[in-house]
Amino acid sequence: MGFEKAFVTKKLTEIDKYLKELEDLLACSDKQIKSDSGKLHIAERLLQLIVDTIIDINTYFIRELNLPISEDYQSTFFTLAERGILPKNFAEKMAPIVGLRNRIVHRYESVDTHLFLSLLRSNVKDFTKYIVFIFRQLKK
């Protein structure tokens, strides 16, 4: 089949759409989000959708470029960094987001709502950076 830039571009567009929704939600205060379980669940779901789509892109690059198979989804970031698709320091920063996604989705352990919102607010720009790095790779 070969590497399909259109597939990756579609996935990046999805992330961008989810980010716009998330940014609208994050315009609310933490107090507003915490007091409205619907808003909190939307924030959690948007994080899940963004991370799932990023994982889809990472695994697509790995498969289509015949890169070494990653042990887990966090490792996909490091595999792309080794290939120069993502900067190493960025991959190190992004990889743990998979663990947060897993804790939220699978309810492995309770997630402190204050910490979740703090992490989400402080790292939301990294999702935009991810889009930029992947678009740069597609242009090569």
Image: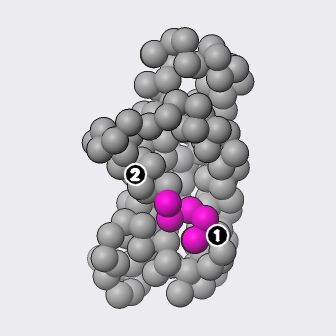
Stretch in magenta: 91-96
State the predominant SS element of the stretch in magenta.
helix
Quadrant in which the N terminus is drawn:
bottom left
Residue 86 position by quadrant:
bottom right
Give the amino acid at mark 2.
Asp
Look at the image and say whether residue 19 sits in the magenta stretch.
Answer: no
- Examine the rendered structure and indicate whether residue 67 appears above or below residue 114: below
The answer to whether mark 2 and mark 1 are in CB contact below 8 A is no
Q: Within 10 Å of the Cα at label 1, are there few (<14), some (14-19), or many (20+) other Cα atoms?
A: some
Give the amino acid at mark 1.
Phe
- Examine the rendered structure and indicate whether residue 134 appears above or below residue 84: above
Which sits in the foreground, 32 or 124?
32
- What residue do we see at 35% from left, 87% from top? 68
- Examine the rendered structure and indicate whether residue 112 appears above or below residue 2: above
Q: Mark 2 or mark 1: which is in front?
A: 1
Query: Residue under circle 2?
Result: 52
Q: Can I make out residue 135 in this image?
A: no
- What residue do we see at 64% from left, 38% from top? 118
Q: What x and y, as percent, mark residue 63?
A: 33, 78
- What residue do we see at 52% from left, 30% from top? 113
Residue 71 position by quadrant:
bottom left
Q: What x and y, as percent, mark residue 79?
A: 46, 81
Which sits in the foreground, 5 or 37?
37
Element type where label 1 sits in the image = helix
Query: Residue under circle 1?
Result: 90
Q: Which of marks 2 and 1 is nearer the N terminus?
A: 2
Element type where label 2 sits in the image = helix
Q: What x and y, as percent, mark residue 53?
A: 43, 52
Give the label on residue 114, or none. Answer: none
Q: What x and y, as percent, mark residue 28?
A: 68, 19
Q: Distance between the residues labelled 2 and 1?
A: 18 Å
- What residue do we see at 35% from left, 49% from top? 102
